[in-house]
Each structure stands twice: as C-alpha cells, then as structure tokens.
Amino acid sequence: MQKNLVIVESPAKAKTIEKFLGKDYKVMSSYGHIRDLKKKELSIDTDTFTPDYEIPEEKKKLVTELKNSAKNSEKVWLASDEDREGEAISWHLCEVLGLDEEKTNRIVFHEITKPAILEAIKHPRHLDMNLVNAQQARRVLDRLVGFRLSPVLWRKVKPALSAGRVQSVAVRLIVEREREIQAFKSETYYRVTAVFAVPNEDGTMSEVKAELDKRFATHDEVLAFLDKCKGSTFTVAGIVKKPMKRTPAPPFTTSTLQQEAARKLGFTVSQTMMVAQHLYENGRITYMRTDSVNLSSLCINSSKAEITSLWGEEYSKPRQYHTHSKGAQEAHEAIRPTYMDATSIDGTQQEKRLYDLIWKRTAASQMADAQIEKTTVTIRLSDADEQFVANGEVVKFDGFLKVYRESSDDEADGQEDTSHTLPPMTEGEQLQRSEITATQRFSQGPVRYTEASLVRKLEELGIGRPSTYAPTISTIQQREYVQKGDKKGEERLYTVDTLKGNAITNRTKTEMAGNEKGKLLPTDIGIVVNDFLMKYFPAIMDYNFTAKVEQQFDTIAEGKAQWTAMLENFYKKFEPTVEKTMNTREEHKAGERELGTEPATGRPVFVKIGRFGPVVQIGKAEDKDKPRFAQLPADKSMETITLDEALELFRLPRTLGEYEGTPVVIGSGRFGPYVMHDKKYVSLPKTENPLTVTLDTAIELIRNKRQQETQRHIKTFEDEPKLEVMNGRYGPYLAYDGKNYRLPKAMHDKAAELTLEECMNVINNSKKK
DNA sequence: CAGTGAGCGAGCTTCCGCTTGACTT
C-alpha cells in the first residue's frame, strides 16, 4: 500500500515535487481539468442551472490511473493551483475519485522549493466550496453565452460562426480601431529645428540641435518666422540641470513576455508560448502562464548574488513586485529563470534568445535605478518671442540599463532616442546659427493592433486569462473575423524650408505614410458579425461586461452570494433577447447593402454574406430568372465596393473562341485570372488584362504551357517508379513519393545523368534533418 | 517554394480555462 498520493496540475511540476518529497510520496498530474460540460450539448439545466459534467474521452485513461492510485494510497493530497480553476480541479478530482470531502487534504504552495512544500504538507485544509462555485458560475456563464449566441449567428449571418464573452470583444476592438482610422483626419503642422555652432575649449566646434517651443499651423507663419530669424541673434537664456532616475520594468508575466518577444525577437504570440513551454519542461524557467509579477525569495537572493558578482554591489537592488492588473489571480510566480546563475543555456536558437530575454528582464528587475542628468538649454531670439530648446541627457549611472531596456510599440515613429550630451555653454552666451529647418508634419492617427498589443489591451480590460490569450488570437483568425496582414500606406508630399545664411530654400519631399506590417485587420464577416452583436447584444459586447461578472464571481467566492442565483439573474435577461433576435423576420440579411441596379436588366445589385463568405448578387431568389452570384475579391470590401466595381466581377468568365475544337475561356480563380482550355489551366501573366486579352494571346499561353510541361520531366527510373527528376521554376529537383527534395547546386548540370543511388542519397540525407 | 483553379440543397457548426501530447507540415 502506497502511503501518500499528491496530485498537481502539470507533469513537469509533479516531477520536481516528487524529488523533494521522498519515497513515501507518489506525485501524479491531472493535466489540467479532468471533467467538463459535454462537448456537443448545452449541458446545463436552464431551470436549476445544474451543470451536466462528463469526463472527456481523451481523459478516461488518465482518470482510471488516478483512481487506482488513490485507492492504493492511505492519504490523497490535492495540490492543484491556488485559484478559482485550481480549486475546481481539486473538487472534480474529489468527486470523480470518490474521496471523502471531510477527509480531503487540500494543500497549496506558492513556490516549488523543498521548504515551501514541506510547510504546505503541514497545513492541509478542506475544499473551499465558495471558490469552486465561483468557478462553476464562470464556466456555466461562458457556456450559456457561447452556445446560445452562436446559433443566432448561424441563422442570421452564416453557418459555423461563433460568439463568446472573450472573442467577440476582441473582434470589437479591432473593428472599432479600423473605423477610428477611417474617420481620422490628419492635420498638418510645421516643426522647426535649429542647428547652432558652439565653440569647444580646444577651439573646435560642436553642433547643438534645438527645437522651437512652438509649432506653426500654416506655411505663411513659417516663412514669417524664418524671415525674423535672418537678422536675429540667439542667446542662451537659461541652463537647467535636473537629476532623473529610471526604474526597471517588473519581471515577465505571460502578457508582457508575449509583447516583448514580439517587439524584440519578432515572435508571434503562439510561437512565444511554444518556446516557453519547452524551456519550462526542461526546467529552465518557471511556469509560463501567469499574471503574477511576484518573485520567490529564492530568486531574489540568487539574483542579488549573481548581479553582485557580475557587476558589483552598487548594481544590486532587491525589489518585491506586486500584481495589480484587473482580475489577476496570482497562482504562480512571475516568469523567470529557475537558476539565475545560468546566464545562458543550451537549446535551439529560439530557446536561447527567449531565455536570454527572460534572464535579462529578471536580472534588471533586481538592479539599481539608472541615474540620469537631464540638461535643458533655452535659447532666446532677439527678433521673435518664440524660444529654441535643446535637450541633453547624460547617464550618470547606468544601473539596470546595463542589461535591459523595455521596448515600446511606437518606437519606430521617428522619435529616436534623445540620449546625447550637450557641449558646455554659459548663460548669456551668444550662439552662431548655422541652419534653421521647418519641416511639415502630420498628426498621427490611431494605429492598428498587432497580436501582442491586442493581448495587452485585453489584459488591461481584464478579459481573458494567460492560458487563453494565444488561443483567442488564433480563434478570431480561424473564424475569419480578423486577418493578419499588411496595410499599404499612401505616398504623401511634405515641404521642408531651410534658412541658411540669408537665403530660404523650399523643397518638396515624398514619404510613405501609414505603412503597417503584420497588423490585425477586420474582414467583412468580422465587421458584419460585430455590428450585428452590437445591435442585439450590447450588454455582452460591453467592454466592462467581464469586469462586472468578475465582481459577482468574487462575491460568490467570498460566500456572500449564491452562484445559481447569479446565473438565474443573468439568464432571465439574456434568454429573452436571444429568443427575440432568433425570431426576427430577416435571415442571413445582416450586413446586406444594395448598390444599385444592373443597367441592362434593371435587376437589383447588392452585397451580402453568402454561404461561403461575402458575395455580390444580381436579382432576388424569388425572381423568375435565377440570381447571379460573384464572390468578392480579397482587395474589395462590402462596406466600400461600388456598383461599377461589382458589375466588373460579372464580366468573367468569358469565352474567347475555339482552339483545336474546344472553347478557350478566361476565368478568375483563387489565384487570379486564368485561361482554361481542354480542362487545363494556364495562369494569366500580370501584364495581361483578363477583360481585353485576345484569342491569339491565349493560344500562345496554352502552347507555352504545353512546352514547359514536356520539359518538366527530366528523368524517370524503371526500378523506382515513385522517383522522378523534375525541372521546376528554380532548376532541377527530385519528386519522391509525393514529396519534393532540393538537389544540391553541384548536381544541377548533370541532372539528366543522375543514377537511382545518387538520388536516394539526396533524399535520405534531407530526411535525416 | 517546385502546382493550384467551386458554387450557395449532406449535416454540422459553437463557449472559456486548465493542461500536454500525438498527429502532420
């Protein structure tokens, strides 16, 4: 008979703890939740709000193992995380394993160290049913919202769509940001900078850059000002030195790690989580799904030792951080290296880089402030009221800046770091002007979200949890509410006026404005679904909805409210809205927009969301003649497409004539326009317009393609029919068993003479990698 | 990387959180 069984949530944690506890303890993992609502049904009695739980198929084997182990143990310790979800996991274990609730030993530890765990074992408690009920309320509410709302979308918008407390608000953020950008009107202004020459002690000259304390609204004001500068003298009116300090950012949470890895390493949110998972499983870092910035005393002490030995005592400053983000539950520590004395690790390139980032952020958080001296010099003009201001920054003591500096999202916007020194100047000193420049600028509109900045916004609103940020972002892309893509900016003209000597020169330059890469853009479906939900379910779409229900979950957790009563309250308002919306007349009409009529027939032309996405339709379903359909191309949107653009789409496919007795047709497919002849397709080059291309050109394209086809097969082998030497766009390659393999450059010239053995060598070598 | 190319009448689809594999690419 086994003495003790300890159950934790994660297998990596189980392995570590087992070492600390010795042979009287067996440690197993539940791999998260072991029971949930049924997958395909609502699984909730909507009169009593009783959930109907089941053990999912993929967990059955694990549960049997846990059951057997529990039966053969004298004592079972439930050691899931100390938060709402963790408490519920313990309760489900209790129920499923048939443990006696009164005799349950529920324990929690705040850090994975031997003393902490031995201490926890000394203080077992019972299950906190209030906390469990708060979790049940959370789970049931999310199911009700998701499973009652989604079918409304299936009927009113398009099949297989989804809605939920978290994802729908995430889409709303992106849709609204896009509308803000559309509505934004950029205003122009003029920024004036001056360069002065200042003599150094050794007789050489230094340059000082200063900016005018006023921005001009019109070009006339600029010219008037530059004119005044011509005869003006420039005098140093004041020098102010101010000491400043900069403090390090707190250690990483899931959300801040995702943001920094995106900015500094270019990782996607899910990439970051995958790499972090590896580091965690290899014992390199603490748990990677956390909203806590807390560091264990172990880490604080070893950081101090490490920093002192690397850079000296003056660089060390132990700090305790406290979490105050909305809805934080603090079941774990911050994300940090398990051993601070490991300054680097073995692993893949990505693992090394992410580890390095985590190590530096953690170390910096335990380091001294940076001491900076900021110097501000004001320069007065004799002939104008405005003043120039020059700023200098000197780092007196670098402190944490030695290892780490946090990035910000809008860093790339020309606001480069201004840390530079000023040459010595004295009050009353006259400066020699060398050049004054007025540059036209434009006010910056809102920027689109990236994956990482959306995560930050969601966390700020208290929506979603560390374990769901990455999945939420992929869900809204999978449902095609949102697309990651590039938005091309527009070319813009701006003027630069320069005063040099006594002459003012004017130049006009061009720049690209509003160029954005890898940003989240709403699709037509995303916009339509959002507008629909905003119209009928504003309460769910409210940015504060989650915060409001979280407050109620907290009240339940404190034992001051009944969880089923809370759900009843919610449902009695929610359910009638669902019913009402379901029963509105209009089906699949959301987002429909009439563009006008087709000139030839007078039939109505409109855009709508069809079975397979946005389409243009001519005529109505009830008409005598069947309606015609055309899918919206990727570069057009339902909100902005015009009647003419819509009618263009119906000019394809068109038949050009016949060749070798079969028709030649120009069509438009997923990959652009093509020529179809005898069931074979040839892509139309970009230089040809599908609406005007001639039969002769099309025939030429068909012939070219045929010739290419004959040259594609270089060599086949009798002994191995699955293998073939092919000729592709990038030279010869091998095709074997449905896969393609690159041929080394040296073998390109003798591709036609390759032997079977040589080919198989290439294939086996590349398979090894 | 290496070729691709539709129609709008199968029944099904869906939530949020907690955790990792076992599958391919």
Image (cartoon, coloured by chain):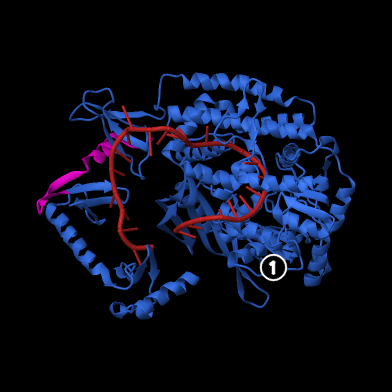
The residue located at (66%, 39%) in the rendering is: A35
Residue A139 lies in what quarter of the image?
top right
- Tag 1's secondary structure? loop
Residue A728 lies in what quarter of the image?
bottom left
Relative vertical location of residue A205 with respect to residue A496 in this rendering, above or below: below
**Nearest the eye: A658 or A327:** A658
Which colour represents chain B? red
Label the blue chain with its letter. Answer: A
Q: Is residue A645 magenta?
A: yes
The residue located at (74%, 36%) in the rendering is: A95
Q: Is residue A115 left or right of residue A92?
A: right
The residue located at (66%, 63%) in the rendering is: A355
Residue A63's spot in the image, x, y percent?
68, 45
Q: Is residue A417 visible?
A: yes
Residue A636 lies in what quarter of the image?
top left
**Nearest the eye: A520 or A429:** A520
Judge the density around disc 1: few (<14), some (14-19), many (≥20) Cα neighbours within 10 Å. few
What's under tag 1, amino acid-wise?
A: Pro
**Nearest the eye: A586 or A735:** A735
Residue A397's spot in the image, x, y percent?
76, 65
Q: Is residue A197 magenta?
A: no
Residue at which label 1 appears? A424
Residue with the most extreme front position: A1
Residue A384's spot in the image, x, y percent?
57, 51
Q: Is residue A251 visible?
A: no
Residue A572's spot in the image, x, y percent?
62, 19
Magenta segment boundaries in residue numbering: A638-664
